Image: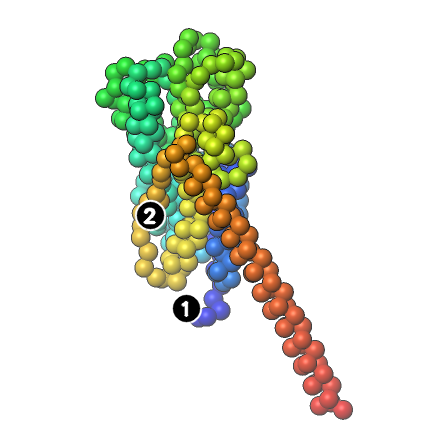
Amino acid sequence: ASENKHYTIGFSQCTGGDAWRRQMLSAMKGELLFHPEIELQYRDAHGDNARQVNDIRDLVKNGIDLLIVSPNEASPITPVVEEVFKMGIPVIVVDRKISSSFYTAYIGADNYEIGELAGSYVSEVLGGKGKIIEIWGLRGSTPAVERHKGFVHALSGFPNIDVVAEFDGAWEIDTVKHGLAAATTQATTVDLVFAHNDVMAYGAYEVFKEARPGNDTKFIGIDGLPGPAAGIQLVDDKILSATFLYPTGGEEAIRTASKILKKEHFEKDNVLLSTVIDPKNVRVMKLQTDKISSQQADIVRQQEKINEQVNAYTKQSVLIYILLASLVAT
Ligand code: FRU
């Protein structure tokens, strides 16, 4: 490939409004600063399968060189992703999976393992005995299914831990607030709520705080985002007992895309690591994520400075050129 080759990546995001997805996009943009030859076209399907199918078709029409996709639900999005792949356009799937192997690379943490980690944590916290509510992510999305399976597996050796209610919270706080009203009136004692993400765990906490003041129900989530009111802070504030880090894979997606486009070696399946965040390590996590955020802001500032200087240099070069040209003419 020549030095000045330009590439266009289309990124079809299932939903873009939440903090986790915003972090994914900003990680992508941060990494793109190092790849000025790549342009990103972004589409947000707002949690709508039909809209995501259209978004992907649109991006293909625009002539993208590679597609990055985080599918809202696996089965409705699989056919269009297969189509794109079969057209010869490389496809990187991030976070949520499709239900076939017609993709070029996958990037994401192991959701089954995260579910298992959560299950073992719960068995420890409850001392092997207690009543639980499980709040699922959107049932048609693979992280929800995998987190559930891992969780159930880890708890299978604990006959005195009962899941007294479970429902689909669709990854959203509002769905949880509605769904929980029914679940909490049914269940008399609830020792712990395990939600498939921190947003839903926080929603559950709020419902319980209102409906059962003084209760000592524990809340556990997944994502472990930095920033105000997000997972790490919620653990530090003792609102959540624990969360599990679910890295967005934004940077890795762009790095892998660049390798694919430049015909360099890449791995098909890229598993990102997770870890528990609880009172034992939350301070260290906070310090580290704060540091990373400020370093990222520095990188952006440095890039802006470089751009300013390049612009100033270009302007000066043009002026010198005009000056020389007029000297030659006279
Ligand atoms: C964000 C999110 C995360 C969750 C992931 C699963 O949209 O709901 O909270 O971990 O998606 O795909």
- Name the residue rendered at 50%, 45% in the picture: 290
The type of residue carrying mark 1 is Ala
Q: Residue at x 33, y 28 (%)?
A: 121
Judge whether 19 appears above or below 317 on screen: above
Q: Position of residue 87 (x, y in %)?
A: 39, 52
Q: Element type at marker 2?
A: strand
Secondary element type, mark 1: loop
Quadrant in which the C terminus appears: bottom right
**How busy is the neighbourhood of tag 1: few (under 14 within 10 Å), some, or many (20 plus)?**
few
Q: Which residue is mark 1?
A: 1
Residue 77 in sight: no
Residue at coordinates 28% horizontally, 14% vertically from top-left? 160
Q: Which residue is mark 2?
A: 270
The disc, 1 or 2, on the residue closer to the chain's N-terminal end is: 1
Q: Marks 1 and 2, how far apart in space?
A: 26 Å
| Residue 191 seen in this snapshot | yes
Extreme residue toward the left, this view: 157
Of 268 and 147, the residue lying toward us: 147
Q: Which mark is residue 224?
A: none
User: Are there few (<14), some (14-19), or many (20+) residues within 10 Å of tag 2?
Assistant: some
User: Between 282 and 181, which is closer to the camera in this rendering?
Assistant: 282
Q: Residue at x 44, y 13 (%)?
A: 183
Residue 101 position by quadrant: top left
User: Horizontal and vertical percent for residue 232?
Assistant: 47, 35
